Image (tube, rainbow, N blue to C red):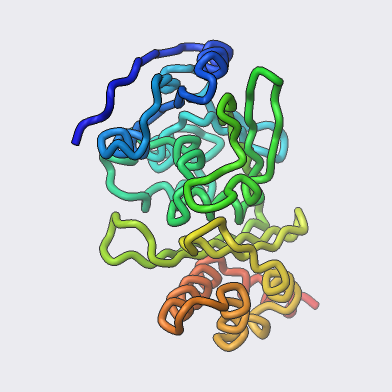
Amino acid sequence: MKAAKFAYTRVFDVDEAIEALAKGGGTAKAMSGSQSLGPMLNLRLARPAQVIDVAHIAVLRAVSRKGEWVEIGAAVTHADIEDGVYPPLAAHPMRQVAGGIAYRAIRSRGTVGGSLAHADPAADWVVTLAALGARIVLRSPRGERTIEADGLMLGAYTTVLEADELIVAIHVPSETSTTRWGYHKVCRKPGEFAEASAAVYFDVSRKRARVVLGAADGPPILLNEFAAEVASKGAQAAGRDKVSAAVCLALPDRDGIDRKLFTACVERALEQSGVFSNHKRAEQET
C-alpha cells in the first residue's frame, strides 16, 4: 500500500515546528528519521493531514554536556551515537545500545526522539532511558516541560505527548568512574524486535540503582526493590532464584518460557555491568 494523501512541510526551527503542529489541530504529525512513521503511513495505520519534517532543525541534532547531564537533541540518529560522533557520548553506555538497534540502514536515519515518540514497547531506547533515569524535554505553544523517561509511555504506542507537543531533547546522566551498566535483549535474529530485554544501571556516586524490563507489551517495568537489594548486597541478592522471583512478581501473567527469557536478560545485563566485582573490591578494602 501507499500512504494516503498528506501535506509535507519541512521546518528549520523548533518554534516553526511547534506553530505548525498547533495549527494542525491534532491532524499534523512530526517526522524526523521516518523509520517508524514512514511504514505506518504506507500501511495507512497513520493518516495525518500534514507531516512536519523536523530532521533539519540544527538544535535537534546537537549534543552537549551540561554539568552531570548530557543533553541530546531529539533528532540525533542512532548511527551518530554508535559512531561516537559526539564527544559527550563517546564513552557513554548509550553507544553500546545504539550499535545493536535494528540494521545500519535504519540506524543511519532513525532518531532517539522519534523512537521515544513512537513508543514501541520493544524499542531499545524506551528501556535504556528508563534505566538511566533520563529526562525528556517537551515543548508546545504553552511552553516547555520536562518528564521522567519512565513516565513517557502510557501503553504500547501511546504516550503522554499532546498533539501539539514536540520532543526537543533528552537529558541523560553523564558517565562517571562509578557507573556500572548493562543491557541485554533476546531477538529471534539480529536486527529484529526484542522478545525480551533488560537494562541495569548502578552509580554509587549518584545513589542510583535501576533494573528495568523492556519488550513487555507496555511501558518499561522498573524492578526497584530488586535493584536496591543488588546495590546493597551484591551477588548474594542476584542469584537466579532471586532474579526469577523479581521477574515473576513483575510479570505474573506471562508464561514460564517468557519469564525465563526475561530472567536471562536481567542476569546477563547484571554480568555486563560488573557491579558484582565492584562489591568484591569494596569488601576487600574493608
> In this image, 163 relative to 135: left or right?
left
In the displayed structure, does residue 68 sit left or right of residue 162?
right
Q: Position of residue 191 (x, y in %)?
A: 29, 55
Relative to 254, residue 53 above or below: above
Residue reaching furthest to the right: 286
Q: Position of residue 237 (x, y in %)?
A: 67, 82
For the residue pair 112 and 37, the one nearer the viewer reads as 37
| Above/below status of 200 relative to 18 | below
Q: Quadrant of the N terminus?
A: top left
Farthest left residue in view: 1
With respect to residue 12, does 165 lie above or below?
below
Residue at 45%, 36% (x, y): give it.
114
Question: Where is 30 relative to 111, above or below?
Answer: above
Q: For the point 42% across and 47% down, which residue is it? A: 98
Rendering coords of residue 124 (x, y %): 45, 52
| Residue at 46 percent of width and 64 percent of height | 197
| Residue occupying image coordinates x 28% and y 43% | 104
Image quarter for residue 43?
top left
Q: Looking at the rendering, in which quadrant would you find the C terminus?
A: bottom right
Residue 80 picture location, percent across and down? 40, 35
